[in-house]
Amino acid sequence: MKIQSNSEYCLGCGLCRIYCAAAHDGYNGSVIRAFKKGTPQARAGLIEHQQQSWINTCRHCQDAPCINACITGALQKNNEGIVFIDGQRCVGCLTCVMVCPFGHIQPSLDFSRAVKCDLCRDLAEAPVCVSHCPNGALRLIEEV
Amino acid sequence: MSLSMLTPAFTVERNQDRCIGCGVCVKQCGNSVHHKDEDGFMWVIDKNCVGCHRCAVLCPTQALAIKEFPAALRPNSYWSTSSLREIYAQAETGGVLLTGMGNPRPFRSYFDHLLLNASQVTNPSIDPLREPMELGTYLGSQVSSLGEREKPLLKLDMPIMFSAMSYGAVSLNVQKSLARAAREKGTFWNTGEGGLHSDLQEYAASTIVQVASGRFGVNPDYLNQAAAVEIKIGQGAKPGIGGHLPGEKVSADVARTRMIPAWSDAISPAPHHDVYSIEDLAQLIETLKVATNFEKPISVKVAAVHNISAIASGMVRAGADIVAIDGFRGATGAAPMRIRDNIGIPIEIAIAQVDQRMRDEGIRDQASLVAAGGIRNSADVVKILALGADAVYIGTAALIALGCHLCHTCFTGRCNWGIATTEAQLSKRLNPELGAVRAANLLQAWEHEIKEMMGGMGINAVDSLRGNRLMLKGIGLEQHELDLLGITAAGY
């Protein structure tokens, strides 16, 4: 599974990143609480180039370099194919940040650990970037 | 001119307790209302705001409220604030006031003075969830004699079609949305006068193509691939005047579809230069019938104006299979404000009068009657059918379903909702996949509601509703208005 971004309809509004940040780190999706009280961090990036824009997020690679490079086994793939970071195991060495071929994985704001897209695996519904995209430019697809 | 006396029409209020400074408003506003400095300070230019609500709808924390600018002029029931604003604008520019969409003035809406009937005791009402309910209808001439070739008919699964909106006036994504929705729901969309884009040819069987005074994009393939051909004589928003698509909207793609040079003004003359009489109209209708091998119904669309019943009678005698009448609430992408706000008559009265005239003259079966201009909801549809229409065109309602917030500035080509624009960066804001679902949902919702209302009246087919004025009663209307509508007052 991964998120496919259709630049034909991506407006570059960045709402995907805002809702992404509010969905993680315990903010439970509340944008106001996340941004007014906390230090939210979006898992995805937005690339804008020549009036085109698209989301830069994890491809959830089949043979993921980040998993192979992780020194503590924090990076794992679950049976749905979602590549995620086990926060308990991550020691913040940031090797994964360096090996990710798409520049997706980022250090956390305090550089204590790495953060990446987990396709909102804790939520029952679709990833928040997909469900909040105002123009249907993001889709969750099965293929890798 | 140094000083503008115009105060802003709207003011943008930002609730700082809610604003997170994300800048979505800045990116989404095509009118440069919202700004964000490098240090994060956010500020607005109120006078640029047209009240389209794009920023307020997309704001993730609902921090924005668009309000009427509190310019408290001394109250004056004659010289309204808008009267003053219009004069200030004209004193500054010396130009004709332009506007978009339909007539907003507080003229009486007859729809709001009509009440529907329901069955009680003496006849049974019908539950549309348990019993079949027929909303399908056929448009075209229902007259044929033995040995004569069968006349072509349009089969509609519901008596609602999408109004003519041309590519150029609206974005291609609007047409894609409506075309998909029309095909899915078994009804028709209308190209307007701007030709049929190559991307939309797959929807040709659900398409009514228009032949207007500019003849843009008209060729034998265009006529023959469509389900029906419509001659546009007039439009409810601007009866008596033509159209003018400014050159800056005529992109290469629009130009190709319209078969005109790119970036040139696309001017539709006020009259068809080959139609100066009913006889001329008969010739054009015959020409189009011959060009389409008598296989397509020919519709003629006019604006509802004075003496409309005589005009419609002439159109039927000229051979029109469908008479489409556009009331004075009909919308447009651009029209002079004085024309839009002061010309035409209400569609309710026009349909009632035309239906009666055609019945009186014994020609009602020669043509179908389509009502357009200001149909806001399914109750309006039921009422206009009961007044005599066979089907309706919806334009404004369809655009609202796609996101239009009726800011009336379509003519600027800067539509923030990606509707009335051909600019790539703006028109991409309407994803036709989502648009088609929204437009189809609207049709589906109205379909359910119409069935409920018909069932309540004990009517199980839309054919039994057409012209069934016994189902209507007037409330708060004068006797002459009741007479014009051909109904009696509530209580009778």
Image (cartoon, grey):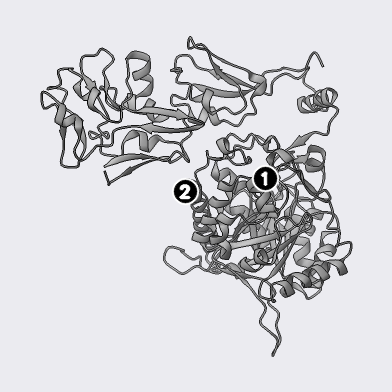
Q: Position of residue B374 (x, y in %)?
A: 68, 49
Taking the image as shown, residue A17 lies to the left or right of residue B210, namely left
Q: Is residue A51 above or below residue B194?
A: above
Q: Position of residue B209 (x, y in %)?
A: 66, 61
Q: Position of residue A51 (x, y in %)?
A: 51, 31
Q: Could you tell me which residue is drawn at 80 percent across and 13 percent down?
A: B2
Mark drawn on residue B433: 2
Work out whether residue B490 can be spotted.
no
Label whose residue precedes the other's in the sequence (2 or 1): 1
Given residues B66 and B42, the one toward you in this image is B42
Given residues A12 and B419, the one toward you in this image is A12
Mark 1 lies on residue: B169
Q: Residue furthest bottom?
A: B147
Q: Is residue B451 above or below residue B60?
A: below
Quadrant for the C terminus of chain B in the image: bottom right
Work out whether residue B62 can be spotted.
yes
